[in-house]
Amino acid sequence: MKPLRAVDVIHAVGVAGRAVSAALDSRSARITSDMLNSAGSVAAEWYVEALWHYLSKRSLLQGVSAIDVEFEQPAALADRQVFFSLPRPEADDLVMGFHVLRLPTGAKSKVPVPVARIRIHRARHRRLAAGAPDPPHHPYGIEIRARHLNHAKQVSWHTMVAMMMDVARRGAQFADTAAQERFDATRLYVVPGFSFTPLADAAAQSNLFVYPEFSLEKPWATGRTSTSARVTIWAVAYEDPWPLASSLVTVVRTSLVAGARRPVDERGTTGQKASRRPLQR
């Protein structure tokens, strides 16, 4: 047996250290039915709330200016568990990746399959891209109850992202007048990604409501399969409303084509360069 060289020992210790660090910096959660959206996949709000819990426990929320969420594959109940890596606090921009384990055709062992990725931007101040907006005047919203609060007794990111996803998809659908002229029972509007900028907190109090404001960043264009929308979440109790969060959301028009969900234009046709990646609803 050849004697170990110092460089070999250093290399082995470094590999072991990285393996231990990776194990300590990862977590898993069992997928349950209450985590799913109407399409049967893990909902966007669950991913964002998992991030909030991590940041809150480490007192890192104060430095978060915005997050970007990108979906790779829908995570379903059949996947049983979702795994996620924890961001490293010393990094300038934090990243939290989520994956499931699946068995490829003909393989003997499961491999990681990415399902979502959140990039966290850090800055001293949170702000909107444009000037301070005027609050909308309409009665649509929800009264805040215990289920809408996080552990800090404030309106949760989970509540705001769930509202944002519903409003963005439905608002984009209502604005898509060209496609609505053609009936398609399989047409769905899905979100492959969005940005989320927390602007303020809303602590639990009586008569507290949150409500959304929707606007298209750009109108639906002929031949295009997607658009972008802005959703601002407002809070109001007894005094003037204040904005809680703002999201820029990409919304894709999809339909079933040859048995698979694909992006389609207003005529229901898919372009040659259309993404073949499954989309998050």
Image (tube, grey):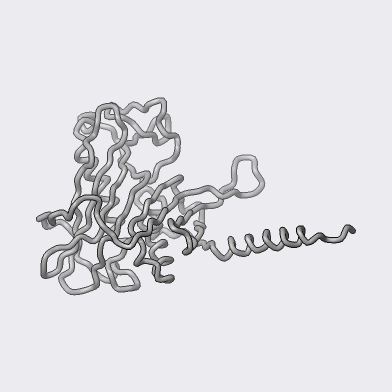
Where the N terminus falls, by quadrant? bottom right
Task: Using the image, determine if residue 100 lies above or below residue 250.
Answer: below
Which residue occupies the foreground of this view, 203 or 189?
Answer: 203
Q: Residue at x 46, y 51 (%)?
A: 76
* Residue 254 seen in the figure: yes
* Residue 81 seen in the figure: no
Residue farthest to the right, as pictured: 1
| Image x and y of residue 261, in percent | 39, 36
Give the quadrant of residue 268: top left
Which residue occupies the foreground of this view, 61 or 103?
Answer: 61
Task: Using the image, determine if residue 36 lies above or below residue 155.
Answer: above
Which residue occupies the foreground of this view, 224 or 180?
Answer: 224
Q: Residue at x 50, y 58 (%)?
A: 84
Q: Residue at x 38, y 54 (%)?
A: 43
Residue 205 falls left or right of residue 64 = left
Label tally: 0
Give the quadrant of residue 158: bottom left
Q: Residue at x 31, y 65 (%)?
A: 156
